[in-house]
Amino acid sequence: MNKLVLFFLFSCFSVFAQNKEINVVFKDAQTNLPIEDVAVYVLKTKLNYVSNVQGKVTFICNESSIIKISNSAYISQTLKSANLKEPENIIFLKKNSSDLDEIILTKQHPQQILKGIVANSISKLSVPARLKVYSREFFKLNGAYNYYNDGLINFQISGKDKNYETTILVDQNRSYGLIEQAVENDLLGYNLNDIMKNYYSFKYINPILESSAKKDYDFIIKSNATNTDYYTMLITPLDENKSMRDDVQIVYDRKRKIILEISTFLSPVTLSKIKDKKSDGSKNIFKSMFKAVYKIQGDNYYLLSSKEEIGFDRMQKKQTKSIEVRNYLVTTNFSNQKLTYKENEVFKDKTLLNKKNVIITDYWNNSGITATEEEQEIVNKLEQEN
């Protein structure tokens, strides 16, 4: 065979072998259930990924690489990409928590401890910095999905403490479906211009830092025998409260005194105490949750991912409109280097809602979070109807 042909075939084979798609599903070692929000860091590419609700992560690994796996509730692992040879690689993780979890008694009130942890976390967040983020949003009206958008966005963060400034540059984006104007003005989704300010100032837990919160919430700090470096603070509304107050869970590194994870949600018990409003224009929330995960990577500390879900019934002209919004952010890449840009390239709108589609590559296939089968069906359906 001609040497040139052999060289060509070998080159093609090498390129094919290097561009390897890897599929991983994370499962609980005890329950066999999928694990959401497992952080996957590919050392070679310096890219982050987060498992979806089915526990799945899909990524391209061009060369053999070390892969770091972490989740605050599970024991971390380190793998080699070369060992992930199956079409679907199932990895079982063992929980950190156990029946030996202990309640920590402190001289200070837990709220006072939390205030110190929040202040220290704000001071430790890496700024200035650039986060390359995959943003995704699903919108449901009266039980049917009718809008979707996603995008690859650069958030350039500067400033100090709570005086943060964010410059936004959108690399690519796509939007499918339609939203009624009346509903669009009422969306409780992202405001991209201040979302990073909120995450970096920990705005979502401000209510439990107020002095009055000591009377409104029960604060408990727990540790476990498996991972003594992490503490979990559970903040629960007291039973006598009939106002809308979130249950809050905060995971933090007790030695470094920095926050690793925040989760808030409205429990069914809390929602059952709230009376529905009947007046025109009022909103009756039936679902609300928020989760933010922060990452320590060497000397850097930054937002890794966030997820928000809100569902409410809006009373309008004696009719009820049911509205649900589900948002995700995943920081695929962190950098200390600033981008250069022209002023007219800066994105200043609230959301990607009305931005014209800019699709250069199929960025969503290596986005940081893999779409579930149900989510992909929703996107395909809206794309066809667009």
Image (spheres, grey):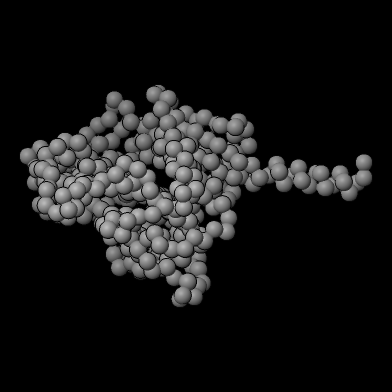
Residue 201 visible in this rendered orientation of the protein: no
Above-or-below relation of 267 to 284: above
Residue 376 visible in this rendered orientation of the protein: yes
Above-or-below relation of 250 to 363: above
Q: Residue at x 45, y 76 (%)?
A: 343
- Give how far across and how far down residue 360 sits, in percent: 57, 59
Residue 151 horizontal side relative to residue 179, left or right: right
Outermost bottom residue: 343
Residue 237 horizontal side relative to residue 5, left or right: left
Outermost left residue: 240
Q: Residue at x 60, y 32 (%)?
A: 87
Q: How many marks?
A: 0
In which quadrant of the rendered image does the N terminus lie? top right
Quarter of the image where one finds residue 218: top left
Residue 226 versus residue 339: which sits nearer the camera? Answer: 339
- Give how far across and how far down residue 296 sits, in percent: 42, 50
Quarter of the image where one finds residue 300: bottom left
- Give how far across and how far down residue 34 sits, in percent: 42, 31
